[in-house]
Image (cartoon, rainbow, N blue to C red):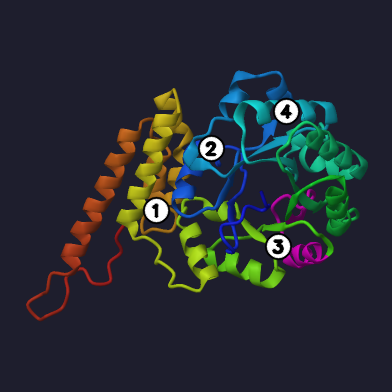
Amino acid sequence: MQFPYRVTERVPLYLAPMAGVSESPFRRLCRAFGADVVVTEFLSAEGIRRENPATLDKLRFGPDERPIGVQIFGADPAAMGDAAALVTDVFAPEFIDINFGCPVKKVVKRNGGSGCLKDLGLVAQVIQAVAARTHLPVTVKIRSGWSEEMRDPVSIALRCQDAGARALTLHPRTRAQMYTGAARWDEIAAVVDALDIPVIGNGDIRSAADAARMHRETGCAAVMIARGSFGQPWVFTQARALLNGTPVPPTPPVGERFAVALRHARMAADYEADPRGAAIEFRKHLGWYVKGIPGSAELRQQLHAVDSFDQVAGLFADYLDRSARYAAVEATPEPDGELVGAGESHP
């Protein structure tokens, strides 16, 4: 199997691994909207090897999520190898991805995620240990370095390739940057030129136009979308159209956007064992779905207080009803031909 995953000859679009976001319901939704490949949330190798129930629960996925990669993190090569073996034997994804990019403090303080980038010898050992315990392709996701002083994405990427990585994703920021500043796409282009394995571009893709521009400017073999998918899974449909040179579907109007949000909510409710907990956890998604619509601040405040999915449907219905009434008033002609309410704000 070639990596990154190829669908005929088109540029694959990946949903990025994101803690608390790229859970099974969202992965399935993004696949339905055109994501070619999805990756799980990053999961602790120690949690997997110890068969922690909460960790293993996050490894659940269905056939409609394939092709899928499982992303693991850790700084102990032996533990990473054990985790890879268990994931391979029990869950059988299409590939295993190693997280060398997470900048979160609680991860890097144990040298996990981007913390590994301080020691490229350790990076190589981890990749070799994982590759030795699985027949699946092993891929890696990196940042450009630990700090500006240690910024050298080409050298890091070459070490990963030499250690056995079959594909590499670059988020061109350092750990020190976290998510500030701009992602330096020129570094993706430099890594593409230096490596023989496929390079997946990631970082600062907020729209379909950004995805197409990244591919055009860097020559990356695939594009990975992270925060640009929040509240707009249709970004994959739009990006595919741009990459294929076909008409781009318009962004869904509010009513259709709400329908997608409710579809996502139902999938989350079916997936999670605790309906109330699922609704509370889903609040962040609701905030993303309503971002930018008229009157979103008030609606978002209401949605961030829900503890059941029935409440979500009710709030959406009320919003659409109010919007329809405002539209009807604005369209009613005055005796002199002017429109009632013209120029007034509405939700």
Residue 214 spot, x, y in % from top left: 65, 67
What kind of element bears circle 4? helix
Residue 30 badge: none
| Residue positioned 48% across, 48% down in the render | 31
Q: Is residue 287 magenta?
A: no
Asked which secondary structure carries label 1, the reply is: helix
Q: Quadrant of the C terminus?
A: bottom left
Between 279 and 341, the one lying in front of the other is 279
For the question of whether residue 299 can be seen, the reply is yes
Q: Position of residue 100 (x, y in %)?
A: 77, 43
Residue 295: image quadrant is bottom left
Q: Residue at x 33, y 57 (%)?
A: 254
Q: Secondary structure at mark 2?
A: loop
Label 2 and label 4: CA atoms lie apart by 22 Å
The numbered mark at residue 182 is 3
CA distance separating discs 1 and 4 = 46 Å
Q: Would you say 328 lies left or right of 91 here?
A: left
- Residue 23 tag number: 2
Relative to 247, 15 lies left or right: right
User: Mark 4 or mark 3, which is nearer to you?
Assistant: 4
What is the x, y in percent for residue 337? 12, 80
Residue farthest left in this picture = 335
Residue 76 in view of the camera: no
Label 2–label 4 contact, CB within 8 A? no
Q: Earlier in the sequence, mark 2 or mark 4?
A: 2
Q: Nearer the viewer, mark 3 or mark 2?
A: 2
Pair 2/4: label in front: 4
Bounds of the magenta segment: 171-193
Q: Nearer the viewer, mark 1 or mark 2?
A: 2
Judging by the rendered image, the residue that carries numbered circle 4 is: 85
